[in-house]
Image (cartoon, rainbow, N blue to C red):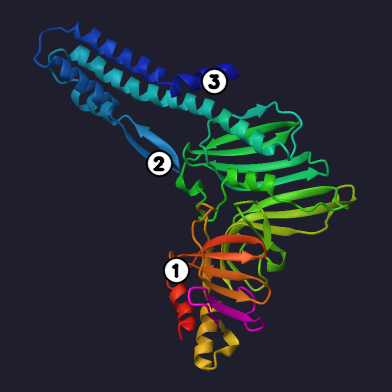
């Protein structure tokens, strides 16, 4: 049966069906033309017109199900069929050919959808976390998915040997109009496919992580192992705005290192994974040992740290001017600057990690953290945390608002 499905897919995608289909239609129209009862001016064009009339349809949806009415054929049957005209027999045949073409096309699409959206099992042995990314690429290529798909839901459980015990993976391919569910059944990958039949099924979220990004991150970030753990769970979520900051880490996409999120940062929007090591308490009963969040795409409202409790310095390396916030004696000016710092609205920049810019205006704290702004591109800033650097998009007027204090 699988060979039949593959042939149907090949015939449709290669254009073979269309070639045979339209070849047969043209051949039949030529055939009935030569069966004409009498000579008639422009008869060939009239036959084509009656064929098009037979194929004309009206389509509307009822509870998301398409209803197709052969409006052209009904018009012919009730209004034109009994009208006296030359060559009426072959014109009727051309009209019937049109409606047959209409429903043959519908039937062909149904057959192709059955083949294209069928459930498939993949005989891939030794399914583990070490091979999950490569296994997905194999499945993606076999299904003909687009090069980048959106992850809708993802949960995997694996043991200390990285053998996968449970997989629930639900992805969306907008290009190919597919929803794909990937799981494990009897030791093999089990894939279920369905068609996106209406826009309400599409999950729109600008902070979604693609399937490829997610598997790349899981494959590369360092996740702590626990001696007591029997099972590890990784779950993807596209809304992590509610999480505890003390359990949150940001993932640096350039080298997959992770850094702890500042305790006083407010997460506006974020997507990422939840990592849960678990120990078995009794048969069928499990207990969480710990949990952590790793943000892959995010937007944060940054207080950096609690600026009122740490020492904040602004430094302009172009004029070698340093300003300590506590040294600003004007209470109004100090309050204004603190408000500016506490309202920095930054978004992770997902462009090239190797940015050819060097910051020249720095906001530093006494813990070694700093945000570097650039005069050459005021819309970008580099955040340095220890030895890790990440680029962000910042308000383009932030540079001038901060720099004014080093110009006085």
In the image, residue 305 lies in the stretch drawn in magenta? yes
Question: Which residues are drawn in magenta?
Answer: 303-322
Percent position (x, y) of residue 131?
71, 36
Q: Residues within 10 Å of mark 1 (few under 14, many from 20)?
A: some
Classify the position of the N terminus by image quarter.
Answer: top right
Q: Is residue 303 at all visible to an observer of this figure? A: no
The percent coordinates of residue 169 (x first, y second) are 65, 42
Residue 375 marker: 1
* Residue in view at x 32 percent, y 17 percent: 22
| Cα separation between marks 2 and 3 | 30 Å
Residue labelled with disc 2: 61
Q: Residue at x 48, y 83 (%)?
A: 405
Q: Earlier in the sequence, mark 2 or mark 3?
A: 3
Q: Which image quadrant for residue 95? A: top left
Along the line of sight, the residue nearer the viewer: 303 or 138: 303
Q: Is residue 248 above or below residue 33?
A: below
* Image location of residue 369, percent across then percent down: 64, 70
Name the residue carrying label 3.
6
Q: Residue furthest bottom?
A: 330
Sequence order check, earlier mark of 2 and 1: 2
Q: Is residue 289 above or below residue 81?
A: below
- Is 62 covered by the magenta stretch? no
Could you say which disc has been placed on residue 360 in the image?
none
Residue 340 versus residue 187: which sits nearer the camera?
340
Q: Nearer the viewer, residue 395 or 115?
A: 395
């Amino acid at each position: 049966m699988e060979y039949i499905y593959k042939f149907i897919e090949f015939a449709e995608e290669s254009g073979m069906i269309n070639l045979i289909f339209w070849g047969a239609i043209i051949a039949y129209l030529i055939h009935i033309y030569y069966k004409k009862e009498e000579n008639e001016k422009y008869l060939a064009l009239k036959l084509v017109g009656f064929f098009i009339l037979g194929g004309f349809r009206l389509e509307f949806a009822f509870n998301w199900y398409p209803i197709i009415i052969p409006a052209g054929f009904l018009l012919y049957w009730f209004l034109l069929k009994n009208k006296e005209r030359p060559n009426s027999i072959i014109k009727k045949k051309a009209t019937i050919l049109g409606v047959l073409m209409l429903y043959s096309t519908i039937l062909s699409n149904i057959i192709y959808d059955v083949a294209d959206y069928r459930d498939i099992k993949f005989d891939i042995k030794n399914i583990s976390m070490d091979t999950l990314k490569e296994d997905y690429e194999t499945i993606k290529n076999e299904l003909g998915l687009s090069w980048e798909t959106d992850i809708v839901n993802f949960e995997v459980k694996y043991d200390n040997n990285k053998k996968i015990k449970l997989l629930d993976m639900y992805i969306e391919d907008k290009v190919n109009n597919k929803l794909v569910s990937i799981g494990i059944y009897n030791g093999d990958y089990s894939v279920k496919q369905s068609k996106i039949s209406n826009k309400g099924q599409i999950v729109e979220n600008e902070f979604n992580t693609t399937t490829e990004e997610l598997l790349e991150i899981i494959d590369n970030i360092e996740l702590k192992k626990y001696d007591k753990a029997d099972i590890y769970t990784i779950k993807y979520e596209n809304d992590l705005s509610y999480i505890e900051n003390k359990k949150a880490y940001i993932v640096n996409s350039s080298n997959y290192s992770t850094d702890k999120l500042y305790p006083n940062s407010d997460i506006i929007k974020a997507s990422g994974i939840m990592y849960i090591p678990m120990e078995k308490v009794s048969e069928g009963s499990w207990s969480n040992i710990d949990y952590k969040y790793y943000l892959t795409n995010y937007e944060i409202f940054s207080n950096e740290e609690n600026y009122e409790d740490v020492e904040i310095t602004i430094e302009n390396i172009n004029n070698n001017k340093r300003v300590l916030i506590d040294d600003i004696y004007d209470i109004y000016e100090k309050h204004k600057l603190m408000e500016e710092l506490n309202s920095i609205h930054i978004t992770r920049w997902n462009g090239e990690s190797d940015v050819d810019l060097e910051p020249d205006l720095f906001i530093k704290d006494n813990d070694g953290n700093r945000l570097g702004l650039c005069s050459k591109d005021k819309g970008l800033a580099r955040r340095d945390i220890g030895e890790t650097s990440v680029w962000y998009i910042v308000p383009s007027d932030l540079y001038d608002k901060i720099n004014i204090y080093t110009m006085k």
